[in-house]
Structure formats: C-alpha cells, structure tokens
Amino acid sequence: MKEQIKIGPFHPELEESVYFKLTANEDKVITDVEVINGFIHRGMESLITSKNFMQNLILTERVCSLCSNNHPFAYALAIEKLAKIEVPRRAEALRVIADEVKRVASNLFNVAMLAHLTHSHELMKEAMKTREYMQDLKEIIWGNRMDMSANQLTGVKYDLDEEKIKLINETLKKVEPKVKILAEKFENDEQLRSRTVGVGILSKEKALDLGVTGPVARGSGINNDVRSKAPYSLYGELKPKVTLREGCDVHSRAMVRFGDAMEAIRMVKELVNNLPEGSTYVEKKPQVPAGETTVRVEAPRGELIYYLQTDGSQKPKRMRWKVPTYTNWEALKVMLEDDKVENATIIVNSIDPCISCTER
Amino acid sequence: MNIEELNNALKTKLSLYEIKEDQDSYANLIAWIKLKEKKEIEAIAKTVKAYHGRCVVATCYQNDDSTHSIIYHFDIDGLLVNVQIDTDNKAFHSIASILPSANWAEREIREMYDVEPVGHPCKDRLFLDYSIAKGVLNDYIPFSKLSVGITPNDILWEKVNKGEK
C-alpha cells in the first residue's frame, strides 16, 4: 500500500521553508519525490536592477546568511572585471582568509547537524563547540557571526594587525586538532556509519548529468571545485588540495566537508603568516562601462556564478546568479528514491541546502 | 579544453555564429558565442555533453524591442562557455533532455519571462505560485519600487499612467 509523507513547508527540522511530498511503499521505501519550492522567493534579481552598484554590495551580502561572504565576493569580482580594476594583493589575501574562515564554520555546522540527525549527540556537541571557536573569531575580527562585511568594491573593508593575526593563529591551533579528531570519529564511528554509509546514493554518472557541484559532486568523485579548475584571487598560488570520495553517499559528502575544512585551515594559516604588504583597497570609485561578464567562486556548498550586464549607468541592467543548491536540489530526487523514509532528513541535510540563496 | 579546440568541435555543427575569447581577472579562459539560429543550441548542448560538461545556469533578459535574449552558461572542465540565443516569438528549444543540468534554469525562464522552453520535460512551476501570471520580470512592479519609487528621473505612477514599462 502506498503512503504519502509530507514534510514542510514549515517544519521544525527544516531551517528554511520548502515542501517535500514523498511517496513510500509498504516497506517504507521512497518511490516518488516531489519538491515544491518558492516560499522564500523575493524577486531579488529584479530588486538588484533598481539599486546602484554600491547599494548592491549590501544587498548581495543579504541573499542568505550561510553564503553571505561569497555573494559580495563574486559580485565585487564582476564589477572589478568590468571596471578593469586590479585589487591589491593584500586585499586578495584578506578576501580569501574571510572566505575560508567562513568555510570552516559552515562545514562544521553541517556535520554537526548530521550527527544530530543520526542521534550521535556527543559528536554533535563536539562539532558545534569546535565551530564556536570560528564563530567567536568572526565576531571579534569582522564584528558579526554571519555577515562579515569583508568585501567592498575594489578591495576589502577590514585589515589584520599583529594582534589579530595572533588571535587567528591561536584559534586555529585549537581548532585544527579538534577538526582532525572529529574527522577520524566521523570516519570510524559505528553508529554514524550505520546511518550514513550507502545512504542517499548519487552515482558519478548521475552527478555529472545533473551538474551538481561542491561537496555533493566531490562525494561522488567529481572535481569541479572552482578554486582548482578556474582559480581566482590567490587560489592559483595556494593550490588547494581537493578532497574526493568515491562512496557517492551521505558519509562521503560529510568526509569531503572535513577535507575542505582542514584545507581551509591550512590556507588561512599560510596567508595570515605571509600577509602581503600594501593597501587593502584601490582608492578609486569604480567606473563601470557598458559590458557583460561572468565570474565564479567556490562557496562552501559549491560553485557560485554571477552574470552581470551593464549599460554605462550606475545600476546593473541585468544580474543573475546561481548557487550550488540550485542544481543540487534536483539530485535530491535521485538520492531519496529507493532509500528509506527514515533517512530522508539525513539525505536532505547531506546537500547542505541553502534555500534563501536558491530562490533569491 | 581551450577555445580553439571548442571552435573546431563546433565548426561543422553550426551554420552561422560568432565566437570570441575572453579571460577573467585571473587569466581563466571564457568563451562567448552568439548563435544566429536559436535551434542550434541543441548542437552546442550535445557537444558540451560529449566533453562531459554541464549547464551551469542560463540567464534571460528582455530587450528594448520586447524580444528576449538567453545566455546559457556551460562549463567544460573549468572552461566557461557563454552561448547567446535571441528569440522574438517567446520560445526556444529546450536542452534539458540533453543536459538535465539545464532543467531548473529553463523552467525559471518560463515563469519569470513567459518564454517557453519548447520540449522541456517538466511543466510544473519552479518558484512562483500558479496564482501569479508568467513573466513577472517582464511586467511586474517590485514592491520596493512601489514603496520608494519616486526619484527625480523615475516617477512610478506617471509611468504607469502613460502605460510605459
């Protein structure tokens, strides 16, 4: 006998609003998935065209809180490309530091939620406590636990002095071994493995077809990390090591996130201890001529692309962006089908969905 | 893949097109292609698929003469390929059956601009409720503009009264 299970649109286990209609057979195996979106659609791409370039920097930071640093970063790159502005190396380094600090916190939050959903409460607490160090760091250096306001057009709004560099080093000294231990526990913990290995399968072939990115792609053995394939800012020199897993399941995606977090810590350490001298921004208001450009960055959840078209005025004529969840959503249907109903929330969590970003 | 290789792969499949090479600020290659025949987007999609590429997303916009342009953004192993097609009849050929990664992008174009991806496998709405007409980005006035729409050069209600966009 068929059974229909409805999750959402507003549900205590969902951070944001979305509506799933799952159909299950008598063995409680999912046979059909319907995802209904649109509850957080705000028409931001329309709003963008009524704001000037400076105002849009503020707006892009508020597309969502989870990827709040990636949006203004990508947007600034697009403006700077059209205005032919070369950002100082110190600003480039500071941009990467902010992004990678955010990546560590973001990934730790996702694996903590995974531990929570698999009822591994000690692991969840450890992951959240470790993340808290990064949150405190963000609050002290950037003044906010989510929206860092690090970027400005032509550079960055913040700088690091010796005291702040010392604080970052001390924080990472505490966080790095904790992330390593957590990764080992997630790799080997039997309770967690029993709920995540072989769960939410997305084959490499399907992943390629659907164009997924980020840890979802890398957990299915596909490297399309923008930092490695089309390196921007200082990533060409930093050469981030890309973690790939072949398991194609929830467990693989979680382990990729640990790999990303460890690599982020390595890059932040390298940058803060070899911070280039010089200015943190170009003292010139960007003059944006008519034109069009596309730029890409790697957010914690995967590839973020911005298309910007200008007509010589002070506002974008058209701006479009696509976040990783936009393509990863469709993959959820593949992951959920033929899996057990009880695994649905774990599988949804494994793409680390960002619905506000997706719907705009 | 570089742009010369891409061009060689496309030459025999397309009738008339323009291709230009571009770079981002970090010397990553970007290709810009403009197709004369919008139908030939299918040939592009097949080529992208043959090279294990994907559709990143697609951007639509309405031109001043009320025609629409669509720019598909493809990725082939790090090479970004932007392909523009134009349509004057509010329709274009869907490539979602060739590249499923284009699925959502085409559905979004349908509801935001009322431009139909012909042959798209899914007819469902993506984001907007059925009570909202298709083509919101062509016609609808944003609420924020309603609230703060009065500027020296842009007086909302005057435009509405004149029937301007």
Image (cartoon, coloured by chain):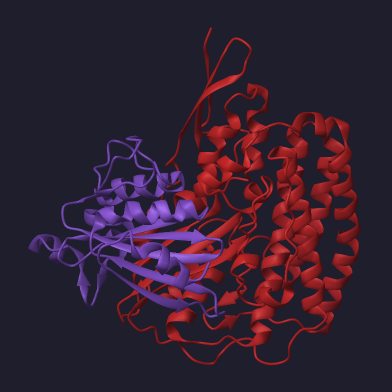
Chain colours: A red, B purple
| Count of numbered labels shown in the rendering | 0
For this orientation, the residue located farthest to the left is B162
For this orientation, the residue located farthest to the front is B12
- Residue at horizontal 63%, vertical 12%? A27
Residue A114 x/y as whole percent = 73, 39
Q: Quadrant of residue A137?
A: bottom right
Q: Horizontal placement of B82 versus B53: left or right?
A: left
Residue A164 visible in the current orientation: no
For this orientation, the residue located farthest to the top is A1
Q: Horizontal placement of A127 versus B72: left or right?
A: right
Q: Relative to residue A188, is residue A263 depicted above or below?
A: below
Q: Relative to residue A343, is residue B160 depicted above or below?
A: below
Q: Relative to residue B72, is residue A57 depicted above or below?
A: below
Residue B70 x/y as whole percent = 30, 59
Q: Nearer the viewer, residue B138 or A203?
A: A203
Q: Quadrant of residue A283?
A: bottom right
- Residue at horizontal 68%, vertical 34%? A346
- Residue at horizontal 77%, vertical 58%? A261
Residue B36 x/y as whole percent = 23, 64
Q: Horizontal placement of A121 versus B70: left or right?
A: right
Residue B70 visible in the current orientation: yes
Q: Nearer the viewer, residue B10 or A16?
A: B10
Q: Nearer the viewer, residue B147 or A272?
A: A272
Q: Horizontal placement of A208 versus B12: left or right?
A: right
Residue A21 x/y as whole percent = 49, 26
